[in-house]
Amino acid sequence: MPEVPASVEFGRFSILPHRREVLADGRPIELGGRAFDVLMALIEANGAVVGKDELIGRAWPGRIIEEGNLRAQIKALRKALADRDVIRTVAGRGYQFTAEVRSPGGRAQAPIEHEWTTAVVPAVAARLSIVVLPFINLSDDREQQYFADGITEDLTTDLSRLSEMSVISRNTAFAYRNRSADTKQIGRELGVRYVLEGSVQRSGNRVRVSAQLIDAESDTHLWADRLDSEAGDLFALQNEITSRIAIALHLELVGTEAARPAVRPDALDYILRARALYLGRLPTRQNYAEQIVLYERALALDPDSEKAQSYLAAQLAGRVLEQMTDSAGSDIARAEMLADRALAMFPSRPLAHYAKGQVLRAQQRFEEAILEYETVLAFNRNWVHAIAALGFCKFVTGSFEEAIPAQERAIRLSPRDPQIWLYYFWIGQVHLMRSRADEAILWFERAHAANPEQPFPHAYLAAAYGLKNETGRAATELAQARRLSSDDRYSSIARLRVVGPFGGPMIRALLEATYFVGLRNAGVPEE
């Protein structure tokens, strides 16, 4: 078998096949795993035309994919290589790589034999690459295998919706059913870094689903979970279980990848580190500041990165929404510019729509934000914060009945979510505006316990206690809200009316009858 070249060069670009990286002038560029596979297939053809079916088979092994997905990868390659002509479209046949390929040092590259890539590339694990092995049916009833297979299929689909994730197809994964291959061997054969395996057991009306995540490189167990539930509607149960596992896995995988050392971090390294801060810590001023620095570094390395632009926009808007910035005006202006640019470049990416939704919510344009969050969820039903934010926007635009169920679903799907304080808080708001002060206090206390640095729960606790005429406790909570707030919004009722956000006329009328009455009783002056 021919030796795998250490690098392949063309123009100002170098390819490191073992690391699945492309460098421009010595610096890594962000390129998805499928785009990399397409590029290698074109280069290996040594100037020959490569058919579309062959390219699809290379980038999506074992999957039936629409041709539009291949066109998207070709477009991404041309953009990354800053040259449309380097990949020529041959009408009715396929694509052709036109640049001269060199070996290191500038000599023309000898023909690249296809065998070295097919033998080696699958063994090189991309970051956040995973295979979901067929879940094992442990039930006495062998016909329950369909439920176990449904869990496997749904998990594969849910994970593939995550923008950072590369997931082996269902058909390929099911080829490992009843095979005794060890985890390291599976990782080598499929070129994945992680393997998820699990089991399903049903006894009477109870169902237990167990899952465990394994690092295929070291064969070490990283994470495990077990979910027990009443059988009931098996289809609904299947959806709930796969959503919870997918969300928990995402948290674990991003944290694990971000912790891996990098000698020379690229844009994706910085993005993963920032994501790990968001997913693994409470939102604080310091946490937001650290995330934003990392996203800025990613953007400096790759100014056209959809992830860097969108995540940075979302976090700039996020710290405005949570009163954790002293530069709200400039934060929102920059966030809007980044989100609009990401949407213009990547109009079909849910992350760009999520960023725009966050910006619109910070601008109190709730009706428009609803459309963006709904678009996100059409792409990815498990985007927990989009579920919760959509529920809040529906609430402030008058759809009370949708508010609490949305937060309850977010809490149920992601019980470890660092934003869970906000879901508790939004439930408390609904109760307060329905004049249910005791229920509101319970939820605001939960919000405060989940994130002690947030001023909102204290302010609403002050109002709730004020409604109950417990003025001493109301005054204490008001003092805490003022201490934690980044502005003077709690200095007067008039000031609070200006800064909001409070939604439309219906919500404002309810606030006047509950929140503002309670705050007056707590000691907030009118002017």
Image (cartoon, helix red, strand yellow):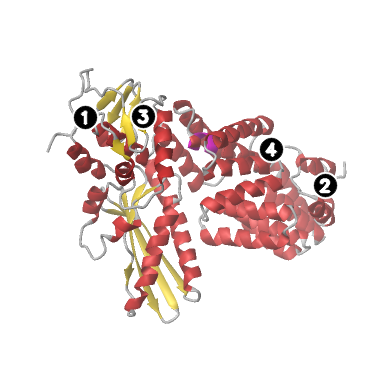
Q: Secondary structure at mark 1?
A: loop
Q: Position of residue 477 (x, y in %)?
A: 73, 51
Give percent across and percent down for residue 55. Answer: 32, 41
Q: Secondary structure at mark 3?
A: strand
Specify the segment rendered in magenta: 307-311
* Front position among marks 1 and 2: 1
Residue 140 can be seen in this image: yes
Residue displayed at 66% across by 41% down: 360
**In the rendered image, which residue does mark 3 sit on?**
88
Tag 4 residue: 486
Tell me the kind of residue under disc 2: Val
* Mark 2 residue element: loop
N-terminal-most mark, 4 or 2: 4
Instruction: From the image, tell me which residue sits under label 2.
Output: 524
Q: Disc 3, disc 4: CB below 8 Å? A: no
Q: Nearer the viewer, residue 224 or 46?
A: 46
- Alpha-carbon distance for marks 1 and 2? 69 Å
| Mark 4 or 1: the one toward you | 1
Q: Say whether disc 3 or disc 2 marks the residue closer to the N-terminus.
A: 3
Measured in 3D between alpha carbons, the distance from the residue under mark 4 to the one under mark 1, in whole angstroms, is: 53 Å
Label 2: how many residues lie within 10 Å, few (<14), some (14-19) or many (20+)? many
Q: Secondary structure at mark 4?
A: loop
